[in-house]
Image (spheres, grey):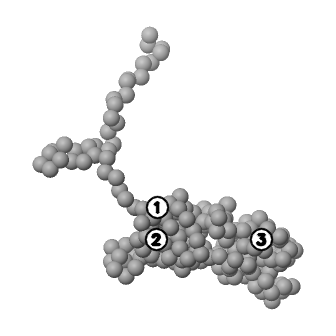
Amino acid sequence: MLLLGSQLIDTPVMSLQTGTELARTKEAIINPNNLKVLAYEVEGPTLDEDNSLLLVGDIREMSEVGMIVDSSDEFVSAEDVIKLKPLYDLHFTVLNKHVVDEQGKKIGKVVNYSIDIDSFVIQQLSVKRPLFKSLNDAELLIHRSQIVEINDHLIIVKSGKVKQTHAVKKGSRHYVNPFRQPNPQPESIDAQQS
């Protein structure tokens, strides 16, 4: 199931043991190499450390009340997880990054993203168009498969060139039916009739 990234910020983190709210999510820790959310920075009055993290692997389930974890023992500091520390220090976010195509044409700016909550991988980017281009399309959805490169300042996506496979000559009345199969299929023979 896909959820907007903004829906997972300021989400309660609930304890399965006590049934109470332990913390709230503050920011997603995202790996820029594969756009996977690895953890959430959390805050709350019951936390031992200021920069506590909740690894997505420790989330038992997502429900309408929030993220459910076993207990407060699931929270770690960034220094406790060696592989996570460099990504935490990077403070990478896809929000507000400019998006351009391979030719350098400006497409817009990322205003949100969609996450598959089973894998916590970002699947789509919601891109707000520049003012003049927003007259036709206010926002675009860009699938992760269209992303070519991510750097500190930009997200580069594949160009949107459309290749026409069936050109219609001027004055021609020949149209291609996209639902018709090009080669007729042979009729099936019932083996019991033979």
Outermost residue toward the top in this view: 194
* Mark 2 or mark 1, earlier in chain: 2
Callout 2 amino acid: Val
Residue at the disc numbered 3:
84
Q: Residue furthest left?
A: 171
User: Are the residues flagged by discs 2 and 1 in contact, CB closer than 8 Å?
Assistant: no
The residue sitting at 80% across, 77% down in the picture is: 78
Total marks in image = 3
Which mark sits nearer the N-terminus, 3 or 2?
3
The residue that label 1 is drawn on is 158
Left or right: residue 177 versus residue 60 is left
Q: Is residue 25 left or right of residue 134?
A: right
10 Å crowding of disc 1: few (<14), some (14-19), many (20+): some
Residue 100: assigned label? 2
**Residue 172 rendering spot, x and y as whole percentages:** 14, 45
Q: CA distance from mark 3 to mark 2?
A: 29 Å
Within the image, what quadrant is residue 135 found in? bottom left
Height in image: 168 above or below 37?
above
Q: Please provide percent x and percent y for residue 91.
A: 68, 79
Tags 3 and 2 touching, CB below 8 Å: no
Give residue 171's position: percent from left, percent from top: 12, 48
User: CA separation, marks 2 and 1?
Assistant: 9 Å
| Residue farthest front in this picture | 103
User: What residue type is disc 1 on?
Assistant: Lys
